[in-house]
Amino acid sequence: MKKREKKPVPGNKIILFPDLEARLLDKATGLVTEKKYKEARSLFGKMLELDRENMKGLYGWAVCSVELGDYSLAEEAVRQLLSINTPYYNDVFRLYLTILIEKKDYRQALSEIRRASGRKGLPPESRAFLRQMKKFCELRLREPSRETGNRAEPEQTASRADWKRLEAADPKQQLLLIHDVGDRLTKRDLPQVEAFLLDERQNPEIKTMLLCAVREKQLAGQIDVRKFGKVYHVVFDSEFLHKGFTDRVERQIRQVLNSQNPTLADLAVDMERFFMMTVYPKPMVPSSVSVWAAAFSAQAAHAGQMSEQAEDMPELFDVRTDAFEAACREIAAVTDDEIR
């Protein structure tokens, strides 16, 4: 008669196999490569059972949690990593920003960017990345709703929009003022709206926000705006903000990147929306969806300090190098000026 197996007694010490941590890490890393994030996270969890401050375990747990959409769990692990002074601070911080942006917690992201900017010895590329992310978060905080509502105020209502203050403010202060001005717009404000939109000195993205407010409140069916030295005629139709083109670019980005790097795909889409808010209604040249999808994906890779991946984008999206470089130059011409 066989002897029954003894069940482990709760509270007994775990008997560690030789190189158990290394074995768990190797297997978990392999599962991440295969995009089996749930199974990989389970193994990173076992590493944390052995040592709750294991940096590789925490980082792996966070990465897998992001890919699985469990942003709260990912944030908890990243915060712990930052609190124990990880030597991989830059990588961990970029992951933390990704988590906050995915959660749409732009205020917390701005707070963390300000704190990180005060660190000594930051390389120039890290400071450029922080400036870009700061600008992006500020824009998303102040971005008006794209949905068209029926909230137009009666024409006889007195306007309280402070145009003089808006026109005189610097771009950063305008971001704080434009939402309030947009909420107070009536048809009586159209002359001031038109003057602001045609003023070459005013910030391009603030002009787009004002266009959004005019459309949302149904104050006009069309209007002129001056951007980048030219006057464009804007019609508030289904193609407002290059919607059809933008949607196709976003689908192309996700079709190519989602299976390999969904986090990079999300960042590329966010950067595309930021660019469109600034550049609209300037025509998209070149007019190829794939070219712009490749260019925004490369911009996102550079922002995440993944330059090698950025160089692969023309081949990955099957586009000509010259067209890809032309789109990248157009992005740089618009966004570099905005980041400064």
Image (cartoon, rainbow, N blue to C red):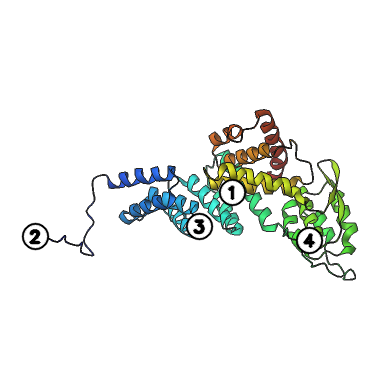
Residue under circle 3? 71
Tell me whether circle 4 and circle 2 mark residues in contact (CB < 8 Å). no
Q: Earlier in the sequence, mark 2 or mark 1?
A: 2
> Which residue is painted at 45% across and 46% down in the image?
35
> Which residue is painted at 81% across and 66% down in the image?
184
Neighbours of disc 1 within 10 Å: few (<14), some (14-19), many (20+) = many
Instruction: Identify whether 202 is placed above or below 107.
Output: above
Judge from the rendering whether residue 111 lies leftward or rightward of residue 219; answer left or right.
left
> Which residue is painted at 74% across and 37% down in the image?
287
Residue extending furthest left?
Answer: 1
Residue 22 in picture, x, y percent from top left:
31, 44
Q: Earlier in the sequence, mark 4 or mark 1?
A: 4
Spatial CA span between label 2 and label 1: 61 Å
Q: Earlier in the sequence, mark 3 or mark 4?
A: 3
Residue 12 in picture, x, y percent from top left:
21, 61
Tell me whether circle 1 and circle 3 mark residues in contact (CB < 8 Å). no
Position of the C terminus by quadrant: top right
Which dot, 2 or 1, sits closer to the camera? 2
Residue type highlighted by circle 2: Met
Residue under circle 2? 1
For numbered disc 2, what is the local secondary structure?
A: loop
Residue under circle 4? 216
Spatial CA span between label 3 and label 2: 52 Å
Residue 63 in picture, x, y percent from top left:
46, 50
Judge from the rendering whether residue 48 lies leftward or rightward of residue 73; answer left or right.
left
Could you say which is closer to the camera, residue 97 or residue 259? 259
Residue under circle 1? 266
Spatial CA span between label 4 and label 1: 26 Å
